[in-house]
Amino acid sequence: MAEKKSLDLGIDSRLYNSFRYDDARNESGWRIGTLAEACGVSRDTLRHYERKSVLKAGRSANGYRRYPAEAFARVQLVRKALAVGFTLDELGTVLRVRDRGGVPCRRVRELAAEKLLAVESRLSELSALRDELRSSLKDWDIRLAHTDPATPAGLLEALASSNNNHVNKPLRSALSERNLKRTGVKL
């Protein structure tokens, strides 16, 4: 008679790989690689979030980072907030207050209102730039229609001598006064 063998579940079983099992169940938190993969970010991104105080990690007995079970939701919150214009420094400040039991809702609202104003300003600048480009293209089409293909039409020179100043406006808003003073550039 053949000897009966016990069932060996292999390397993916809890017996052989307790960390993988725990990660899948999220009972003891997330390892950095598993959280990064689940969130669609890199491990470096998670480390950066830690440095900016928007994400916290503990350490396991072997010294590896262990993120709490709610870390996935926190990373999703951070990514969405970044997408609408919040900075990691702003989020760090707000989330520290919240994590200590504070209520930063009015500050969050204030920051979001600032983001909206910045977006509306940028949209206005982009609209003016669009109008300038449309005008330039119409002028260039006329110039090109009346210029021999082998002769320069002076398109860039026409742009430089244009009376409209919309093209420089986005550039001005992008450069801070400090940078202008430091470089000596005058617009």
Image: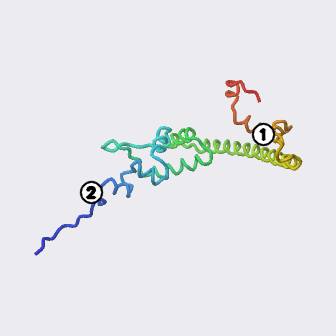
- Residue 168 picture location, percent across and down: 77, 36
- Residue 90 picture location, percent across and down: 57, 39
The structure residue drawn at horizontal position 62% and vertical position 48%, both measured from the top left corner, is 84
Q: Is 180 drawn above or below residue 156 in the view shown? A: above
- Seen from this angle, which residue lies furthest front? 150
Q: Are marks 1 and 2 in contact (CB under 8 Å)?
A: no
- Residue 15 picture location, percent across and down: 26, 58
Q: Nearer the viewer, residue 141 or 134?
A: 141
Count up the numbered dots.
Answer: 2
Circle nearer the N terminus (1, 2): 2
Classify residue 133 as left or right of residue 77: right
Please tell me in which quadrant of the rendered image residue 169 appears: top right
Q: Nearer the viewer, residue 157 or 7?
A: 157
- Seen from this angle, which residue lies furthest right? 146
Residue indicated by mark 2: 16
How far apart marks 1 and 2 lie (CA) works out to 64 Å
> Judging from the image, what secondary structure is the residue with disc 1 in?
loop
- Residue 50 picture location, percent across and down: 46, 41
Residue type, label 1:
Val
Residue type, label 2:
Tyr
Q: Is 177 drawn above or below residue 122 in the view shown? A: above
- Viewport quadrant of the C terminus: top right
Please tell me the numbered disc located at residue 167: 1
Q: Nearer the viewer, residue 97 or 174?
A: 174
> Judging from the image, what secondary structure is the residue with disc 2 in?
loop
- Viewport quadrant of the N terminus: bottom left
Please tell me in which quadrant of the rendered image residue 152 appears: top right
Q: Is 85 drawn above or below residue 178 in the view shown? A: below
Q: Residues within 10 Å of mark 1 (few under 14, many from 20)?
A: some
Q: Nearer the viewer, residue 137 or 64?
A: 137
